[in-house]
Image (spheres, grey):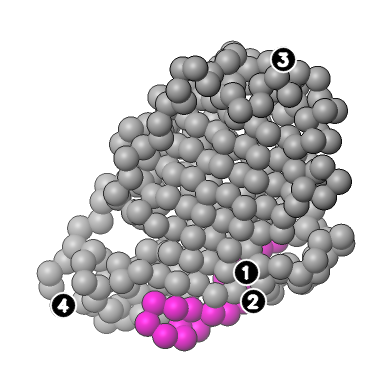
Amino acid sequence: MNIRRWSFGFLAATLLVPGLAACKSDAAEPAAGTSASPSGPAVPADPKEALLASTKEMAKGDFTFTLAGAEMTGGGLVHKPSNSAQVTLKLGDGSQGMSMEMDLVYIDFESWVKMDLGGALGAAIPGMAKNKGKYQHLDKTKIEGIPDLQLDPESLDPVDSDALVKGVTDVQKTAEGTYAGKIDISAATESLALDEEVVTALGAQAKALPFTAKLDPQGRLTELVISMPAAGETAAHEVKIGYTGYGTGTGAKKPPADKVVEASAETYEMFK
């Protein structure tokens, strides 16, 4: 398993990029080609335009997310109002001791990581076992040049669903708030939900995969499911992404002081 494949730089945008102004609701009749929502802006009637618009709310930086894929589950929150974010990931199925759990917290430019590398990895990397269950405080001067632990001002959404929906090539509205069609994921390999090695192994198949999506009454993305065929050593599976809590977050919590240690040299080396 390529531990460095899953990047955490996406969290930076909640700290470095100003949120966009909230969209104003319009009390007037909706324009042609749109449908009115109970509150918030009108939802475009064109299915593809509706999906493209469904990720705009994420620019405000206040939501929670979940994701699941092949041998990977996770979730977290982004909360621009408190300049904080958090993500948890579980990688691997535990077979042959190969598994990894991570919890990363960012608050006002401070960051911590808690890792459980499982039996095999934990034993193979010196110094990891002693920090099991502890949040390692990351020295800002030591993570410079380490992409997996760097702040990236170019992205607000850890799953990068904006890039994913831009890859939609064919879509129909199947019911109120639900859509289905084909999606090209070949250019969205920075998404936390995708394994770049799997996308590469799919080859041309990656350009036309079945997907379904759900939007809430305000037209915001709440679910995106991509059907992934078998590729290389990875069995067929679904990549499932969910969003909730738009505009209702309370922010990440600072790890308890008695659970914090300074990050070890092995931790920084592991991500290089």
Q: In this view, does 175 lie above or below 164?
A: below
> In screen coordinates, is 155 left or right of 15?
right
**What is the three-letter code of the residue carrying label 2?**
Pro
Q: In the image, is residue 177 part of the stretch drawn in magenta?
A: yes
Circle 3 sits on which residue? 265
Decide: marks 4, 1 in contact (CB < 8 A)? no
Decide: marks 4, 2 in contact (CB < 8 A)? no
> In screen coordinates, is 174 left or right of 217?
right
Q: What span is in magenta?
A: 167-187
| Mark 1 and mark 2: Cα distance apart in space | 6 Å
Among numbered discs 2 and 3, the one appearing first in the sequence: 2
Decide: marks 1, 2 in contact (CB < 8 A)? yes
Circle 1 sits on which residue? 226
**What is the three-letter code of the residue carrying label 1?**
Ile
**What is the three-letter code of the residue carrying label 4?**
Glu
Circle 4 sits on which residue? 29
| Mark 1 and mark 3: Cα distance apart in space | 38 Å
Decide: marks 2, 3 in contact (CB < 8 A)? no
Q: What element carries label 1?
A: strand
Among numbered discs 1 and 2, the one appearing first in the sequence: 2
Among numbered discs 4 and 2, the one appearing first in the sequence: 4
| Mark 2 and mark 3: Cα distance apart in space | 44 Å
Q: In the image, is residue 200 part of the stretch drawn in magenta?
A: no
- How far across and down, in percent of the image, does residue 154 sit? 51, 40
Q: Which mark is residue 210?
A: 2
